[in-house]
């Protein structure tokens, strides 16, 4: 463990949980941020089993005051911030013409504005440590579609936001990139398929086969595969990479 402290948001489940556990092999301390304390306790146990310290912060980053609390509590506990991985946030998959203003605002509140506020709040510490930031977007940023327009729109905004932060980071010595995963088999996706399948006369197993075929990929990705990419981006080996949008989607996006 050559590095010191990483903050991972969305650490209670899915890609966030897998990333926190993976980073516990490289960092001395991992700060776990999410709303579900019970699930965070499970993540913390896995982090500590790898020899790293875990700090649990059960906060809602859609709350404007939460970002400052995360940074203050991290600095009190560990004295520095070397990496920030903004993973928290799910956006409703609702048709462009059906989604309300409130649903748009809710989709942006955590994934976009939560990440923006936390990155700004952590920036002085990241600047001091010459640290790294990763923002979770999605490959729908490249091909937004009407049935889930908010997903693509907000993911595109996050990729652009990461680019803007990386521009300032060149001067300040902070590395910033975004990751654009394709379909990953998380608990949230599994629950969605279990709900979707009977409505379309399929079993959950048939639905899990149907979607990858429809997307033109061999299989769903796994959270641990995205976590490996996240770990690389905050490692010394990726230090010269900044302002990049890294797509990992099993070949779903066919364009150059």
Image (cartoon, rainbow, N blue to C red):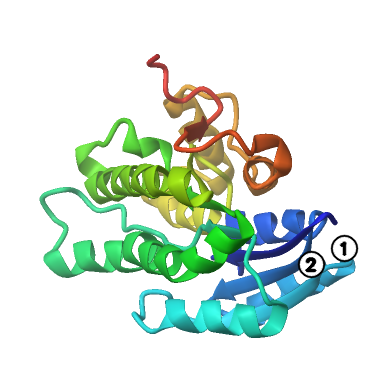
Residue at screen point 51% across, 38% down: 242
Q: How many marks?
A: 2
In the rendered structure, the answer to whether residue 52 lies left or right of residue 247 reads: right
Query: Do tag 2 and tag 1 residues touch (Cβ < 8 Å)?
Result: yes
> In this view of the protein, which residue sits in the foreground, 216 or 120?
120
Crowd band around label 1 with a 10 angstrom C-alpha radius: few (<14), some (14–19), many (20+)? some
User: Callout 2: helix, strand or loop?
Assistant: helix
In the rendered structure, the answer to whether residue 20 lies left or right of residue 164 reads: right
Residue at screen point 72% across, 42% down: 236
> In this view of the protein, which residue sits in the foreground, 95 or 167?
167
Instruction: Report which residue position mark 2 lands on.
Output: 47
Q: Position of residue 204 (x, y in %)?
A: 54, 47
Distance, label 2 to label 1, CA atoms, is 5 Å
- Asked if 43 appears above or below 221 in the picture, the reply is below
Instruction: Report which residue position mark 1 lands on.
Output: 50
> In this view of the protein, which residue sits in the foreground, 149 or 80?
80
Q: Position of residue 221 (x, y in %)?
A: 60, 38
- Asked if 64 appears above or below 106 in the picture, the reply is below
Q: Position of residue 34 (x, y in %)?
A: 54, 74
Q: Position of residue 243 (x, y in %)?
A: 44, 37
């Amino acid at each position: 463990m050559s590095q010191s402290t990483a903050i991972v948001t969305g650490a209670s489940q899915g890609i966030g949980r897998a990333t926190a556990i993976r980073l516990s092999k490289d960092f001395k301390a991992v700060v776990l941020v999410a709303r579900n304390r019970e699930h965070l306790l499970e993540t913390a146990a896995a982090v500590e089993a790898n020899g790293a310290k875990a700090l649990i912060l059960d906060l809602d980053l859609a709350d404007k005051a939460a970002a400052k609390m995360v940074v203050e509590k991290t600095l009190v506990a560990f004295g520095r911030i070397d990496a920030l991985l903004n993973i928290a946030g799910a956006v409703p998959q609702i048709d462009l013409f059906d989604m309300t203003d409130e649903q748009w605002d809710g989709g942006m509140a955590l994934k976009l504005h939560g990440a923006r506020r936390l990155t700004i709040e952590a920036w002085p510490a990241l600047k001091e440590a010459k640290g790294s930031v990763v923002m979770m977007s999605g490959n729908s940023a490249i091909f937004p579609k009407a049935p889930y327009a908010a997903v693509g729109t907000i993911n595109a905004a996050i990729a652009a936001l990461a680019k803007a932060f990386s521009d300032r980071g060149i001067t300040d010595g902070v590395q910033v990139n975004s990751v654009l995963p394709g379909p990953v088999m998380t608990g949230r996706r599994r629950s969605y398929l279990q709900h979707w399948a009977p409505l379309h006369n399929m079993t959950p197993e048939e639905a899990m086969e149907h979607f990858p075929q429809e997307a033109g990929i061999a299989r769903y990705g796994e959270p641990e595969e995205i976590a490996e990419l996240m770990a690389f981006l905050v490692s010394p080996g990726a230090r010269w990479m900044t302002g990049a949008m890294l797509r990992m989607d099993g070949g779903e996006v066919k364009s150059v």
